[in-house]
């Protein structure tokens, strides 16, 4: 069953996960888990438009490409980019909690939860490009509704029945 398209639902989202190379044994699974979790938390309909345009990118950093003040490099940064006003406070809390758990589980290191940073960012209204068009929130929702509307049967002939 698909859910209705809610106002301010994110039609698309990009997730970037940055960690030192070797942190995650299955980066493809991690990317899929993060994207799926975001769709579930946002409660958007499970339609192709959303599934194809909610994606995660896992970036491997060289061992010397990350450091805190003490020189430690065993951190993960996850940045989530959504359209404007897509995540209310409850959804923000859920994304941070769930993404932190997914990262730690994916790395096989429960303590990594304490070293995982999740940043939530929003594109400005009209600042989300898809298919060569910069969409406003209203345009995204209209496109989503249009894409999930059932196809209307085509009428044969142009006249009234006799």
Image (cartoon, rainbow, N blue to C red):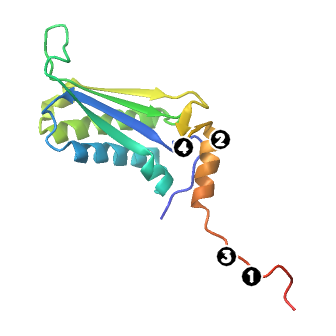
Helix, strand or loop at disc 1? loop
Mark 1 / mark 4, whichever is N-terminal: 4
Q: Nearer the viewer, mark 2 or mark 3?
A: 3
Q: Residue furthest top?
A: 69
- Along the line of sight, the residue nearer the viewer: 73 or 4: 73
Mark 1 / mark 2, whichever is N-terminal: 2
Give the residue at x 59% y 44%: 140
Few, some or many C-alpha atoms within 10 Å of disc 1 (few <14, some 14-19, many ≥20)?
few
Q: Nearer the viewer, mark 1 or mark 3?
A: 1
Q: Nearer the viewer, mark 1 or mark 2?
A: 1
What numbered label is drawn on residue 131?
A: 4
- Alpha-carbon span between mark 1 and mark 2: 34 Å
Few, some or many C-alpha atoms within 10 Å of disc 3 (few <14, some 14-19, many ≥20)?
few
Name the residue beneath numbered marker 2: 138
Quarter of the figure with residue 158: bottom right
Q: Is residue 98 left or right of residue 60?
A: right
Give the residue at x 12% y 33%: 22
Name the residue beneath numbered marker 1: 156
Helix, strand or loop at disc 4? loop
Mark 2 / mark 3, whichever is N-terminal: 2
Mark 2 / mark 4, whichever is N-terminal: 4
C-beta proximity under 8 Å, tags 1 and 3:
no
- Alpha-carbon span between mark 1 and mark 4: 33 Å
Name the residue beneath numbered marker 3: 153
Q: Is residue 112 left or right of residue 161?
A: left
Give the residue at x 61% y 67%: 150
């Amino acid at each position: 069953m698909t859910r209705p398209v809610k106002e301010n639902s994110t039609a698309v989202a990009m997730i970037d996960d940055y960690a030192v190379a070797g942190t995650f044994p299955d980066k493809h699974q991690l990317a899929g888990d993060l994207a799926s979790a975001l769709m579930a938390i946002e409660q958007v309909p499970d339609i192709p438009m959303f599934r194809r345009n909610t994606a995660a990118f896992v970036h491997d950093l060289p061992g010397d490409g990350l450091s805190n003040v003490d020189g430690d490099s065993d951190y993960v940064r996850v940045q989530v980019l959504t359209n404007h006003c897509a995540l209310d406070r409850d959804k923000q809390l859920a994304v941070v909690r769930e993404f932190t758990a997914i990262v730690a589980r994916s790395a096989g290191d429960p303590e990594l939860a304490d070293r995982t940073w999740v940043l939530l960012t929003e594109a400005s209204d009209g600042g989300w490009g898809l298919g060569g068009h910069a969409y406003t929130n209203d345009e995204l929702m209209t496109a989503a509704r249009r894409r999930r509307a059932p196809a209307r049967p085509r009428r044969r002939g142009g006249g009234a029945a006799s």
